[in-house]
Amino acid sequence: NAGVMQNPRHLVRRRGQEARLRCSPMKGHSHVYWYRQLPEEGLKFMVYLQKENIIDESGMPKERFSAEFPKEGPSILRIQQVVRGDSAAYFCASDRAGELFFGEGSRLTVL
Amino acid sequence: AQSVAQPEDQVNVAEGNPLTVKCTYSVSGNPYLFWYVQYPNRGLQFLLKYITGDNLVKGSYGFEAEFNKSQTSFHLKKPSALVSDSALYFCAVRDQNTNAGKSTFGDGTTLTVKP
């Protein structure tokens, strides 16, 4: 999918644990968008990051969720003290010429 | 504000028949409209887009979509469906001033093509 890499593809956590999802954008891109896809729903924007900057986090839940994109390495979406309602597919994307290119997603299951 | 509606959760067609997946939108400025396809356990893949120009847009895998400004619609079509077209389809919209990553997505329509 145009080089956006996400891992892990699947992650299982128990309630109260932490989940860390990683995303590397397309080669040469220094920005990523994160989305959450709940079952039977479309994608919901969470956060837009550039290297070392959070540009727009208007879609991020106020608590337990954070995101970063360090100068070196992938972007990380971190969910602390996971609850069952966090079970979802999390996608990241970068864009080129107005088109979004998505990773394969990370599917989080909270037991 | 921007929004998009996909009124059908599910569309079933027989292989070889034409298919239509509906999408209507609301946006304050000029609309930029997109269709994406998602196969099971995969990410979304771009199919086609309308920015400006001809109302009939052709995209990947033989799909096309028609922009209708008066009806605020952007329905996805294909003249002859294949079983391999079975997937989840998402319509997305933004206006010309909105960052691509902040497009609004519909809830998706599951297309099932039966042999």
Image (tube, coloured by chain):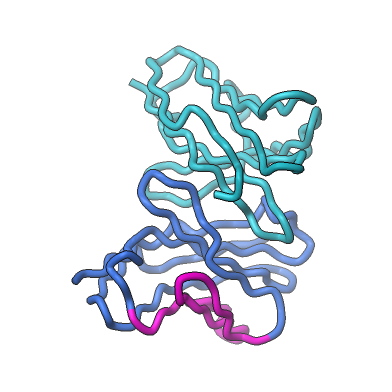
Chain colours: A cyan, B blue
Image coordinates for residue B38, horizontal then vertical, percent: 43, 55
Residue drawn at point x = 79 percent, y = 62 percent = B97
Determine whether A45 is above or below A20 in the image.
below
Q: Which quadrant of the structure image shows residue B81?
A: bottom left
Magenta stretch contains residue B74: yes
Left-right relation of A15 to B48: left
Q: Which residue reaches farthest left?
A: B115
Asked whether, in this view, residue B52 is left or right of residue B67, the answer is: right
In front of the other: A33 or A96: A96
- Region in magenta: B54-80
Image vertical order of residue B34 relative to residue B65, above or below? above
Above or below for A46 versus B97: above
Who's the residue at 38% across and 62% down the image? B109
What residue is drawn where x is 35% and y is 66%? Answer: B85
Location of the C terminus of chain B (image quadrant): bottom left
Coordinates of residue A21 in the picture (x, y in percent)? 55, 26
Horizontal relation, residue B87 to residue A78: left or right = left
In depth, the one of B32 and B61 nearer the eye is B61
Q: Position of residue B32 (x, y in %)?
A: 67, 69
Q: In the image, is residue B65 part of the stretch drawn in magenta? A: yes
Residue A100: x, y in percent? 63, 54
Looking at the rendered image, the quarter that the N terminus of chain B falls into is bottom right
